[in-house]
Amino acid sequence: MFELNKLAKLSYNQDNPKSPYLFSGITVQIQQAERIALIGSSGQGKSTLLRTLALLSSPDEGMMLLEGASYQEVGARNWRKRICYVAQQAVMLPGSVEDNLRTASRLHGTSYESKLADELLETSGLSELDLQKNARELSGGEMQRIALIRSMLLRPSVLLLDEVTSSLDAMNTRAVEQLLQKWHEKEGTTLIGVTHELEQAVRSSERVWFMSSNTILEDAPTVRFFSEPSTEAARKFIGLIKEEVQL
Ligand SMILES: Nc1ncnc2c1ncn2[C@@H]1O[C@H](COP(=O)(O)OP(=O)(O)OP(=O)(O)O)[C@@H](O)[C@H]1O
């Protein structure tokens, strides 16, 4: 369904003696709808990888295919309709919350599904929100959920989630996790989510992509990754986080 073949992005710092790449040699396949957690330490390029998958940044080498068609064949506009990136720092466009929710359908020429929007607002804990409110006056957590719903309304094949619950309290985090799980089951959407919370990765994925050494060093079922990581880097990473959690 979605395939990356030797995908690479050059680093800003070309003089780095270790590698000229931020990441390289990324070869993975997604055969059917999956929930994938993209994890790894800070600065590995997780966000940049997601942005590249959504064609918000171009790959420097390698190939990306969606249902057998390359990103060049599909074209940036159609590609971005089908593979949506939801940023950690949600960006609200000028206007009301409703204007924001309508943006994606307006841009892509699809119809706005107000009933679905209401359902998504309710399930993510935003049923009380005044849709005529200026979107830029929302709290960080409200903006994150509106940005997520704005993308979901496009019904993409792949949703790329960049720490989308980082501004939410525990209750709303769970609500959004459940919303995404149901969406994945109902719509068959593939979810690829960056998280720094390993418990969240365990709760909300069946597969892990572990980024280290400028690539996806491990690609494994979530349970196996956390019980028997096959590289020293992953063992260290899991161990460090466990220590932090105990503190
Ligand atoms: N071509 C590039 N594109 C984007 N970032 C690059 C590039 N080359 C080098 N960098 C650097 O690499 C890092 C990549 O940051 P990015 O946010 O993608 O990593 P991350 O793994 O998501 O980090 P975090 O977990 O802290 O959010 C940044 O420090 C950035 O300056």
Image (cartoon, grey):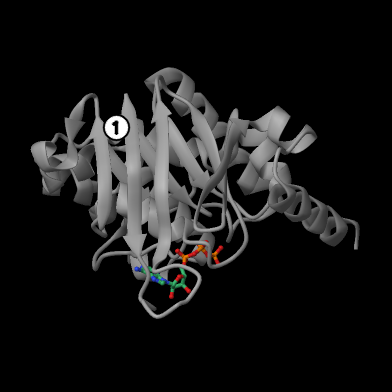
- Residue 219 point in image, percent of width and height: 56, 36
Camera-nearest residue between 203 and 19: 19
Residue at 60% from the left image edge and 28% from the top image edge: 206
Residue at 27% from the left image edge and 46% from the top image edge: 62
Residue 117 seen in the current view: no
**Quadrant in which residue 176 is drawn:** top right
- Residue 154 point in image, percent of width and height: 26, 37
Classed neighbour count for the residue bearing mark 1: other residues with Cα under 10 Å, few (<14), some (14–19), many (≥20) = some
The answer to whether 133 appears left or right of 169 in the picture is left
- Residue 196 point in image, percent of width and height: 64, 55
Give the labeled residue for mark 1: 155
- Of the 4 image quadrants, the one containing the C terminus is bottom right
22 up-or-down from 76: above or below: below
- Of the 4 image quadrants, the one containing the N terminus is top left
Q: In the displayed orientation, state which residue is furthest to the right.
A: 247
**Quadrant in which residue 31 is drawn:** top left
The answer to whether 110 appears left or right of 230 in the picture is left
- Residue 160 point in image, percent of width and height: 40, 45
Camera-nearest residue between 156 and 7: 7
The answer to whether 200 appears left or right of 49 in the picture is right
213 up-or-down from 117: above or below: below
182 up-or-down from 196: above or below: above
Whether the residue under disc 1 has CB within 8 Å of ligand 1: no
Where ligand 1 lies, by quadrant? bottom left
Dot 1: what SS? loop
Kind of residue at badge 1: Arg
